[in-house]
Amino acid sequence: MKTAVFALSFLLVWISEVHPQPVFYQGQTINIVVGVPAGDVYDLWSRLIAAHMGKHIPGRPEFIVQNMPGAGS
């Protein structure tokens, strides 16, 4: 009995198709808004993070850093 159950479950798994999920961030752009002028320490940190963050997110999205001084930061 155990052999029949094992054989049937193996057959069902072998026949079934696996559909991968689409990568959510593929082809997307992520904006990072920095509330300080360009060249400030927080601006440099955000640009450093944006340069390397795309490598660690599935789909490898593009990052854009926008400076908006006085944006409430």
Image (tube, grey):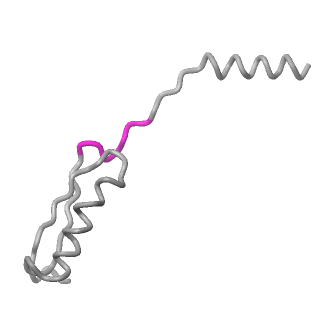
Q: Residue furthest right?
A: 1
Above or below residue 54? Residue 14 is above
Q: Residue at x 22, y 68 (%)?
A: 48
Answer whether residue 34 is magenta in the image. Answer: no
Above or below residue 25? Residue 16 is above
Residue 14: give x, y in percent of width and height: 63, 19
Q: Quadrant of the N terminus?
A: top right
Q: Is residue 12 left or right of residue 34?
A: right
Q: Along the line of sight, which residue is nearer the eye, 42 or 35?
A: 42
Residue 41, located in which quarter of the rendered image?
bottom left
Residue 21: give x, y in percent of width and height: 43, 36
Residue 23, located in which quarter of the rendered image?
top left
Q: Is residue 8 left or right of residue 1?
A: left
Q: Is residue 9 left or right of residue 39?
A: right
Q: Residue at x 31, y 53 (%)?
A: 55
Q: Along the line of sight, which residue is nearer the eye, 53 or 35?
A: 53
The span picked out in magenta is 21-27
